[in-house]
Image (cartoon, helix red, strand yellow):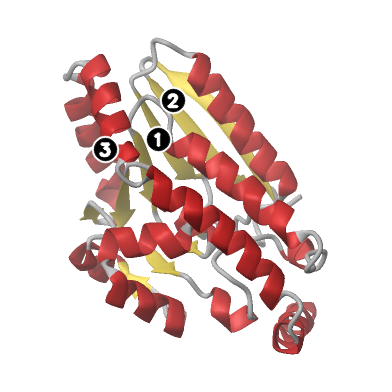
Amino acid sequence: MATLIQYEKKELVGYITIIEENERHPCTLDWDSLAMLENAISEIEKDRELRAVVLQSASPKSFIVGANINVLKTLNADNIQDWVKNGHRIFRRLQALPVPVIAKVEKYALGGGLELAMSCDMILASEEARFAQPEAGLGVMPGWGGSYRLANLIGLNRAKEMFFTGEQISAAQAYEWGLVNHVYPADQLDEGVNTILEGILKNDGKVLQMTKEIVNTHNLRELTQSAYEEAATSAVVMSSESTLGRLKAFFDSRKKK
């Protein structure tokens, strides 16, 4: 396990914090960290006093850069649908939380990390943040709602550019494209998050909950369809020689570091 996820409540705000277990490596997701995230979501769902949630990383290197390499080594055409569906289910629960959820992104939100951030209601970013969906370089599919959520946020053509090239975009470009809500200097990000929280907390919590439910309902059917499609196509590509070759090259390159 490379990444821990902890939850704590401070007054009316809950904080889900992603923590690197080994400071030599960026934050990634595996079965255990996803389970910890789901436990935090379950705790939040039961809290009737909570008014907002912040999802953040404690790592100076990354928000989340994708799946853990040890998980990637175990995935194949037979089990990848379980991996995809599990992530979808947990991210859907995060999206459905009855309070506003803010993703606070300081560094790299790549692959599954970007998909996690997009499951939140808004993304607030440091000027140093970088965003990408680089899955095609490994021969795998964006599997946790990226194929739907990214296009929904920034439009079809720009989403295709990110999927087709896998290139990282800056926080400034992400703001221009509508992927993030605000961009702040690194030393002002916390202040920016607190300003948004103040705006949320002064409003009626029940109204915000019902508004969120209505807005989310607009795209629920399409997102559900995306979950099935991403799971099915992930199984197809995991059987291809190209994908197996790309993954082997990636694993070999990691061994040399």
- Are circles 1 and 2 on residues that touch, CB within 8 Å? yes
Q: What is the CA distance from the residue labelled 1 to the residue labelled 2?
A: 6 Å
Query: What crowding class fits label 2: few (fewer than 14 Cα within 10 Å), some (14-19), or many (20 or more)?
Result: many
Quadrant of the snapshot with the C terminus: bottom right
Of labels 1 and 2, earlier in sequence is 2
Q: Position of residue 50 (x, y in %)?
A: 39, 17
Give the residue at mark 3: 215
Q: Is residue 105 above or below residue 244?
A: above
Q: Nearer the viewer, residue 41 or 20?
A: 41
Give the residue at mark 1: 54
Question: Residue at coordinates 63% horizontally, 79% vertically from top-left?
Answer: 138
Q: Of discs 3 and 1, which sits in the foreground? A: 3
Q: Nearer the viewer, residue 197 or 32?
A: 32
Q: Amino acid at mark 1?
A: Val
- In the visual, does 239 lie left or right of 179? right
Q: Position of residue 161 (x, y in %)?
A: 36, 81
Q: Nearer the viewer, residue 46 or 213?
A: 213
Question: Residue at coordinates 52% horizontally, 43% vertically from top-left?
Answer: 91
Secondary structure under badge 1?
strand
Q: Amino acid at mark 2?
A: Gly
Secondary structure under badge 3?
helix
Q: Amino acid at mark 3?
A: Val
Give the residue at mark 2: 14
- In the visual, does 86 lie left or right of 223? right
Residue 214 appears anywhere in the view: yes
Question: Residue at coordinates 79% horizontally, 68% vertically from top-left?
Answer: 76
Of labels 2 and 3, earlier in sequence is 2
Query: What crowding class fits label 3: few (fewer than 14 Cα within 10 Å), some (14-19), or many (20 or more)?
Result: few
